[in-house]
Amino acid sequence: MTSGPRPSADLLPALERYYDAAPGSACDTEDHGALTLFVPRSGFPYYARPTLGWASAITPHAVTEVLHRQRELDLPRALEWVHESTPSLLAAARAAGMNVEECPLLVLDREPVAPTRVSGVRLVPADDPALPLVRAAVNVGFRSPGTAVGPASTADRDAQAATRPESGRYIQDLVAAGLSVLAGAFDPEAGPVGGGNHNPRGDVTEIVGVAVLPAFRRRGLAAALTALLARDALEHGVQTV
């Protein structure tokens, strides 16, 4: 669940349309009344979320039904929603036995995004040979939660790239189709050490998957990646990040 300060009147509908459209390139949908389940055709697992335009309160029964279907499909039991748009879902999810993680919804204002003083970050096109290692570095970063420096480093990145090549191919296809923009963080000696994406749909995008190898954390790389992705989005006509 995402929540934050009271947004402008036109922001919430734009976000609802975005969250409904974003999984479309990789998922089929199942209609479960109040909730829509996104079933991945390939790549990463997705979630269920409130059906676009649904106006009635969501019940614990509706949540239980979609969780049962996710279990049948061997998908993570996961719901995602914006609390201000669907306030009834919080109580319904808890009544259905879910542990709800409340996360702040961060929306960029329209001030220019200043470049950071950190070097070594750049956009990574679909045909860049570094793309698989950038994606592998992100995967390793997410396997080590938090922001503390840790032991996982380039050997873990290389092993990840070798054992999960499909992850790099999935991102490559999205970038080639214009559905995602990938940025990478690079060390002069170690090569790719982190990365992140933004996924534009119309004039809205979301910055996702920003991670750095634990051995290279606390150097400002994640902040530099985020700033680069935000600037790219604004420079290409996105209105909401």
Image (cartoon, rainbow, N blue to C red):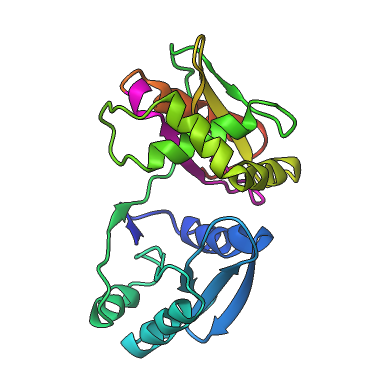
Q: On the rendered structure, is 90 left or right of 10? A: left
Image quadrant where residue 58 sits: bottom left
Residue 103 appears at what percent x and percent y?
30, 53
Residue 50, x across and y down, in percent: 47, 74
On screen, residue 5 above or below 211: below
- Front-lying residue, 35 or 76: 76
Q: Position of residue 62 (x, y in %)?
A: 40, 87
Relative height, residue 46 to residue 121 (above, below): below
Q: Which residues are magenta?
A: 195-217
Image quadrant of residue 94?
bottom left
User: Residue 138, image x and y in percent?
Assistant: 47, 36
The residue shown at (62%, 43%) is 165
Q: Is residue 117 left or right of 36 when viewed as pictured?
A: left
Q: Quadrant of residue 41?
A: bottom right
> Residue 199 lies in magenta, yes or no?
yes
109 vs 10: above or below: above
Q: Residue at x 60, y 57 (%)?
A: 22
Tell me, yes or no, if residue 62 can be seen here. yes
Residue 89 sits above or below residue 27 on the image = below
The foreground one among 225 and 132 is 132
